[in-house]
Image: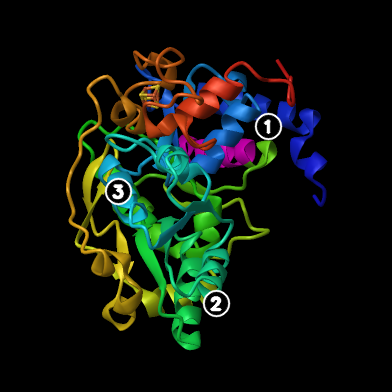
Amino acid sequence: MKYVDEFRDPSQAKKILKEIDILCSQIKLTEDRPIQIMEVCGGHTHSIFRYGLNQLLPEKLEFVHGPGCPVCVLPRSVVDNCIRIAKHDDVIFTTFGDAMRVPGSKQSLLDLKAEGADIRMVYSPLDALTIAQENPDKRVVFFGLGFETTMPSTALSIMQAKKQGINNFYLFCNHITIIPTIKAVLDSPGMRIDGFLGPGHVSLIIGTNPYDFIADDYHKPLVAAGFEPLDILQSVWMILKQLKNGEAKIENQYQRLVHKDGNASALAPIQEVFELRDFFEWRGLGSINHSGIKINDNYADFDAEVEFKLKEVTVTDPDICQCGEVLKGILKPWECKVFGKECTPETPLGALMVSTEGACSAQYSYGQNIDLINTK
Ligand code: SF4
């Protein structure tokens, strides 16, 4: 297939759905509950809701929306630290757009911007580096977040700053790494996931080899998947086929982009600039060992945590928020008490309602939309 329309072809979708139906009826392992497939990545969550795939699948099969939306797992304490940095008169604080709306314990970056702080939305860390060059009398801070997908560009901008001797550019590093995160999900008490849709973009960087432990140690299938409807349906079919045959393998549906060894050019800057934190706090999931990334000592001059003497504090979500239960797959987004009432994309109480990749936002926006593949 070459063109995007082909990846959304309803006739092909119908064929795969029929085979999915047959496989589901043949799988015996989950007689008293649905087969659960976790889509790790928020991009998949968005596609599943956007194309109504969850409504097209048999009742015996359900998606569990995983922790792979970096904005959604951003804890309040991190937003509070962003606010602390951005309040300095000599700071220009730069970030991706979604992060500006995530609620902290008192306000979001967007609220602070409305009060007059110099907070700017950028499309890349290199945009932030340019702002630093153009404003030598200011300290310019880039808020780095995301999984391995966004780490290479952040690392390269720090390397570039060092090479060019730019001494007013800092990174507030909140990147996270996927493998310990999936391991934490697998180790959760009561974990019932039968298989994983592997994150396509992250897999493009790290490859599929790092997932081997999921099959070897936990005996669960994972299929690295693309983001179009047929990509996702084919990946689900591949997982079900393994389950039916009693297999647990790591497979790659997204072969047009993902290779088992990953992308060496993208991994090199990550290894040059970053190292693992001992632990990192996730919204709704608590602390996960070795899941966070920080700047290593060779690049400490660019570390905003050092420059602004930030402390790590834990700030819990308000009791009314049930983001944690949704992130762990215990509740569906619409089962949260405040879904669509106090919490909407315009007035998000929890981070899952902020990003378009968040399960609550995707459900709110596309919950009933099955226009693009109307096969039922
Ligand atoms: S509706 Fe809001 S508070 Fe409830 S889980 Fe979703 S984002 Fe969190």
Which quadrant, please, contains the C terminus?
A: top right
Residue 245 relative to residue 228: left or right: left
Task: Check disc 1 and report its element: helix, strand or loop.
Answer: helix
Amino acid type indicated by mark 3: Val
Q: Residue at x 40, y 15 (%)?
A: 342
Q: Magenta span covers which residues? A: 232-246
Disc 2 within 8 angstroms of ligand 1 (CB) = no
Which residue in the structure is indicated by mark 2? 265
Residue 283 picture quarter: top left
Identify the residue at horizontal 59%, vertical 61% (top origin): 258
Structural crowding at the residue carrying mark 1, measured as other residues with C-alpha within 10 Å and reported as few (<14), some (14–19) or many (≥20): some
Name above or below for residue 376 compared with residue 307.
Answer: above
Measure the C-alpha gap from mark 2 to mark 1. Answer: 36 Å
**Can residue 124 be seen?**
yes
Which of these two is toward me, 186 or 220? 186
Instruction: Give the quarter of the image for residue 291.
Output: bottom left
Q: Which mark is residue 16?
A: 1
Q: Position of residue 246 (x, y in %)?
A: 42, 40
Relative vertical location of residue 53 with respect to residue 77 in this rendering, above or below: above
Q: Which residue is mark 3?
A: 78
Could you tell me how far apart the alpha carbons at marks 3 and 2 are, in whole angstroms? Answer: 30 Å
- The three-letter code of the residue at mark 2 reads Ser
Q: Earlier in the sequence, mark 2 or mark 1?
A: 1
Q: Residues within 10 Å of mark 3 (few under 14, many from 20)?
A: many
- At label 1, the amino acid type is Ile
Q: Is 37 or 322 nearer to us in this picture?
A: 322
